[in-house]
Image (cartoon, rainbow, N blue to C red):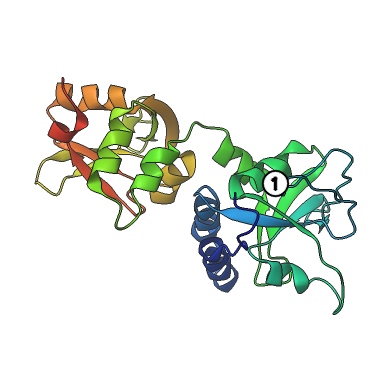
Amino acid sequence: MDPNRPVDNSRVRTAVEAFAADPNQRTSLDVLRACLLDGELLMDITGSQVQTTPEGQLAPGSSLAFAGGAGPDGRGALFAFTSAREIARMHPDGTQVQSLGQPATGALEQAVGDEHTGWLYIDPAGPTCALARSEIEFALGFARNDAVRTALEPDTPREQLIAALRADGPLLMGLDAGADPDRPQPRLVRAPDGGTALIVATSSIEVVAAHPHDGVVVTSSGEVAEQVRARGWSGLLINPAGPWAFVPVAELGPT
């Protein structure tokens, strides 16, 4: 995190605005999906006693007070913000506002790190989105593959995605219990080449964003590559809720 670069997380703010305009499970999931990417949020620490090192880091002796409130059920809520402007909207003109930047995933972790906190409000001055503790715990409770997810971003070289897959990190599969509740099956889809692709995801949130009622199982890129070869499938379809990629079996590495 660069202490000299202002935080302005337009990706999360856009997702929050979409949720506020149409609150539903999918738009709430999209806020979580945005928070799991490589971005930052600000915490309002106005009134804190802060000392910093020459590198801009918090120094010993600092005393932080994080802004918060109450959620819909009365449980505590932590506030997080997509920019300094959004914090300023919470205070009277002339207030000496203080803020602390951290990765968006760090804000999620902080919200569930206190047993008395039940909610994380993003940009509480509005438009806002309140993420429930249960949603955050589901997002953080499974392994993620941030390297593969980052490589799915538009204009990222294909080689970066292939390298991330060959590193044999975690991947997740959705299990469809619709046909046989006693024997849920991995999700399959017709591949762009006309064959069959195994659907995989980089996080639990990406699984349910595509198929909300699926179970989630953690595997690895190496294991799914072996499964695809053994079944004679064409390859992997990663994160069908988008941005997505189809990776033919030949690109998954040597047998």
Residue 103 place in picture, x, y as percent = 61, 48
Residue 38 in the image: above or below residue 145? below
Query: Is residue 202 visible to the viewer in this orientation of the structure?
Result: no
**Residue occupying image coordinates x 76% and y 52%:** 78
Between residue 163 and residue 202, name the one nearer to us: 163
Residue 15 place in picture, x, y as percent = 53, 64
Query: From the viewer's perspective, is 130 left or right of 237?
Result: right
Give the secondary structure at mark 1. Answer: loop
Q: Residue furthest front?
A: 54
Residue 177 place in picture, x, y as percent = 37, 34
Between residue 60 and residue 236, name the one nearer to us: 60
Q: Residue furthest left?
A: 194
Residue 83 in the image: above or below residue 39? below
Classify residue 133 by image quadrant. top right
- The residue under label 1 is 55
Classify residue 61 by image quadrant. top right
Classify residue 87 by image quadrant. bottom right
**Residue occupying image coordinates x 70% and y 53%:** 120
Query: From the viewer's perspective, is 47 left or right of 172?
Result: right
Residue 165 in the image: above or below residue 90? above
Query: From the viewer's perspective, is 206 left or right of 10?
Result: left
Query: Is residue 122 visible to the viewer in this orientation of the structure?
Result: yes
Residue 144 place in picture, x, y as percent = 47, 35
Say which quadrant the C terminus sits in: top left
Residue 107 in the image: above or below residue 200? below
